[in-house]
Amino acid sequence: MSEDFTPGVSAEFNIDTVENASTTPDTELPWAELGLKSDEYDRIVQILGRRPTAAELAMYSVMWSEHCSYKSSKVHLRQFGEKVTEEMKKDLMVGIGENAGVTDLGDGWAVTFKIESHNHPSYVEPYQGAATGIGGIVRDIISMGARPVGVMDPLRFGAIDHPDTQRVLPGVVSGIGGYGNSLGLPNVGGEVVFDEVYQQNPLVNALAVGVMRHEDIRLANASGVGNKVVLFGARTGGDGIGGASVLASESFDSSKPSKRPAVQVGDPFSEKVLIECCLELFGDELVEGIQDLGAAGISCATSELASNGEGGMHVELTDVLLRDPTLTPGEILMSESQERMMAVVTPENQERFEQVMAKWGVEYSWLGEVTDTGRLIIEWDGETIVDVDPRTVAHDGPVYERPYRRPSWQDDLQADSFRASEAGKDLPATAEELGNAVVDLMTSPNMADVSWITDQYDRFVGGNTALSQPDDSGVIRVDEETGLGVALATDCNARYAYLDPYTGAQLALAEAYRNVSTTGAVPVAVSDCLNFGSPEDPEIMWQFAEAVRGLADGCQELGIPVTGGNVSLYNQTAGRAIHPTPVVGVMGTFDDVGRRTPSGYERWADGQAIYLLGTTGDELDGSEFARGRGHLGGTPPQVDLATEKTLGEILINASRDGMIDAAHDLSEGGLAAGLAEMSLRFGVGARVALDGVCERDGVDAFSALFSESQSRAIVALPRSEEIRFTDMTSARGFAAIRVGVVDVQSGELEVAGPFEGGSFTLPLDELKEAWSSVIPSRFGTSASVAEQQ
Amino acid sequence: MTETPLIGDFRAEADAPLDGARIGVVTFPGTLDDRDAARAVRLGGGTPVSLWHADASLHGVDAVVLPGGFSYGDYLRAGAISRFAPVMETLIKEAGAAASSGPLPVLGICNGFQVLTEAHLLPGSMIKNDHLKFVCKDQALRVENNSTAWTSQFTDDEIISVPLKNQDGQYVADEETLKALEAEGRVVFRYLGGNPNGSRNDIAGVTNEAGNVVGLMPHPEHAVEAGYGPDDSTGMRSGTDGLTLFTSVISSLAGGSK
């Protein structure tokens, strides 16, 4: 802020009032430093009919930032609404636009979930960035009236051996654990991806899910003239000022000053108390409207609550409780201090509201009231410093039709297919080569065991976790009586999206959909976190536009709506952007989570038949095998959402009718990874033969193992269920072939096929040792260090 | 039977009519596993009664569980602030051997164990895990004392599996205390298959001299229901070994041995 407008409580400070702004039209304001463009500033002047005050400028600058206003993405994101059919909306209780979408779960239950990014802060300050990412998404869930019941973290880091990753990963993981574990929320899954494109631009996305009774849904609006506006929770401090604008809405550039002061600092204890306190307020029906304070802090909460309600609000800003008494009005409006909520309370309920605050030891201050003037008036010691139409702040921000064009290099990239490349020569062909290739694959950073990370998260708290990492989706029970529950999975293969953003987004959707149905749940809703580079680069903007179009078309075809999400742009440093990374979260529902299907053969499953569902083509472009050889080119695997849907139906019915005991989807690493992971899950061996697949699908053993063709899964079932199961797949015309048998005693994965040597055998204890030591060997000792002592 | 819904309010009526053993579950600010402990009590055949940290009354409960979590954020030493809560003042009196109606059975799990050591109801204390990280895993334990209020239904040296999840789980005490604990058979649970946090003598849980107060770092309340517990020999998440702690105390109370 400019020093001229340093405010204070005494008259000797020069407060930039509305009156002052009207009489000093020529005063220069630091709009550029606050991240505004000159035409945006001109528009603010035009809206107000005068120059903004310092406080008004602060509000507009954060609310019109890319992060808060979606100004570059809005024109594309509309498709998520436009491509939703009435049929898709039937279970949707609250759609896009609120803090999070709400879906009907049945039996009077509703569920809300959402993914958000906290990428930029997590790079600058990994622990606090990741911790407050959890905090923010959890408050979105509370704002809907829900009790949060679980979290997940899709994470992407630079190359595993890069020093940047050494700094960022441990901080991010302990931040997620330190904050999430202290909230009592089980962490039920997510992703861990290493790729050099995320060096200096790690992606730290966070998903939270919450549940509520239908009647408990709350919305962010300030209704009822004369109702009181209250700010409660932590005090407002100087942290996170400009987090949404100068940090999250710009690319990193080493020539600029450190952005560390723009990162918020979290206090999970305050958040946990805030959760319980809010739920008590909801239970006693003490709030009319509620909004969490996240990006853009009080600016966002006041302008959104006011514009969604009666249209006006009157606030006295000196009543905000501060950690730092020297903050200027503009800083107070922009601060992103964590663990704060704003609510609207009727005068009759004020006393009971205060009693709940006292019980939980939560600080609060009454800031003002709801009006019908259509103006958001903010005073500083009785003098008006903000007088705006709140809609112009919250909803009428700039909208850009940013130019976009297909990158000039896209054709060359797609022409460079793996098989035709140098990297695609001398492929493994003999038993020994293929066996070694499977071990190399499973010990590559992206296929390795991630339990060194996930063991730092509490997966048990709540007593309702039915599945978590490493199973295909996280499954949480909602109703203890009936077993009603939800399944969640997040996925994105950004290499596919780089090769073809439209198809890549659909592949991310297909994989998350498949992961949810593999565990037996019926997919019902989508939340997305769209991580891209700078929208000011037309080629990046093309990636974004294509990915959104692909995702919206895909959701329409699968018949599941996008209920909310988040866009994170400017994930680039020194002109180098990340791969387009549209992370897709799919939520499914279970009538009874007790029938969930795990991703591996259990110890009692000896002799069960192993079936491969779906067909295998020669699809190696963008694959994990190609990554191992340093190749990225060609076109990603074909996506066929109708086939995906049929596979989903088969897996859900098989779970519902109790036909199968294990199921695992095939994705990165293909059948080789799928078979290895199923055996590694519980340390149970299997004997597999590829001959049938190779013959039926016309592929060689190498492709059978490493191709990443979509719409495939492996299942294991008792012999007694084989006929019933294959009747079901043939009735749907879906390819199913028996490829092997579970062999508990062997302790090895044996793979036979039409290759020189006939078969290879991988002892599971050796494979497990190698697979599970990849991450600990880079980031420190395993969680149970003393075991080796 | 007091209802304790899993989702939404956890507010059992403190004055509900007596129905079987009534086991108090204390909630401090920052307590996380109170619902889980209440569920374990219910599945064990008792009636959970919610106790609030700021309320000095134990509402006539027959036993008390101090559940896991991060009370007051554990920003000071874990349990150091909770130990001074009004409910603890009463609990310390009732759990002491001098109490007129016989000592109150008390179980401290994880953060609850830390509170009990801070309150000097149990010896020793907990410091940060030796590997300095939070750890969440299925943990094998040997039950080395089955004569306490909370372990009477375990067999001699029974081996059980319950989840372990903590940041400050390394049990430490001076040599003299450790010797006394070992000599008097007051080590109740010992880690098997590797020490997960550097605890002295692989100690996972201890009891007081009277055997009514037991504390342990692993979470028996997360091993009470098939489908949601640790893996065991019968299948994924099928372990229910933790339930025996609750049935032990509930059956002894029903038998009037309090």
Image (cartoon, coloured by chain):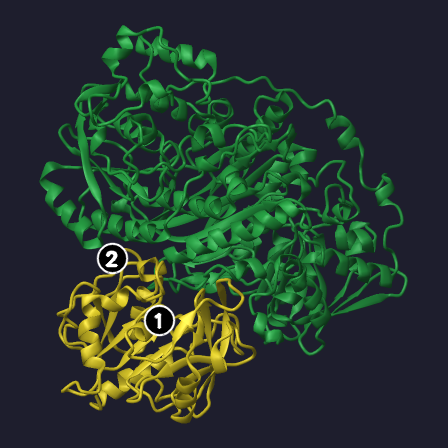
Chain colours: A green, B yellow
Count of marks overlaid on the render:
2
Q: Which quadrant holds residue A47?
A: top left
Side of A674 where B139 appears, left or right = left
Which mark lies nearer to you, 1 or 2?
Answer: 1
- The residue that appears at 66% across and 74% down in the rendered structure is A607
Q: Quadrant of the C terminus of chain B?
A: bottom left
| Subunit ID for the residue under disc 2 | B
Residue A645 can be seen in this image? no
- The 10 Å Cα crowd at callout 1, few under 14, some 14 to 19, many 20 or more, is many
Residue A472 screen position, x and y as percent:
56, 56
| Amino acid type for the residue under numbered disc 1 | Gln
Which labelled disc corresponds to residue A16? none
> Considering depth in this image, is A544 or A760 the residue closer to the camera?
A544
Side of A65 where A218 appears, left or right = left
Secondary structure at numbered mark 2: loop
- The 10 Å Cα crowd at callout 2, few under 14, some 14 to 19, many 20 or more, is some
Name the residue that disc number 1 marks: B114
Residue A122 screen position, x and y as percent:
51, 42
Secondary structure at numbered mark 1: helix
> Considering depth in this image, is A144 or A154 the residue closer to the camera?
A154
Name the residue that disc number 2 marks: B9
In the figure, B124 relative to A618: above or below? below
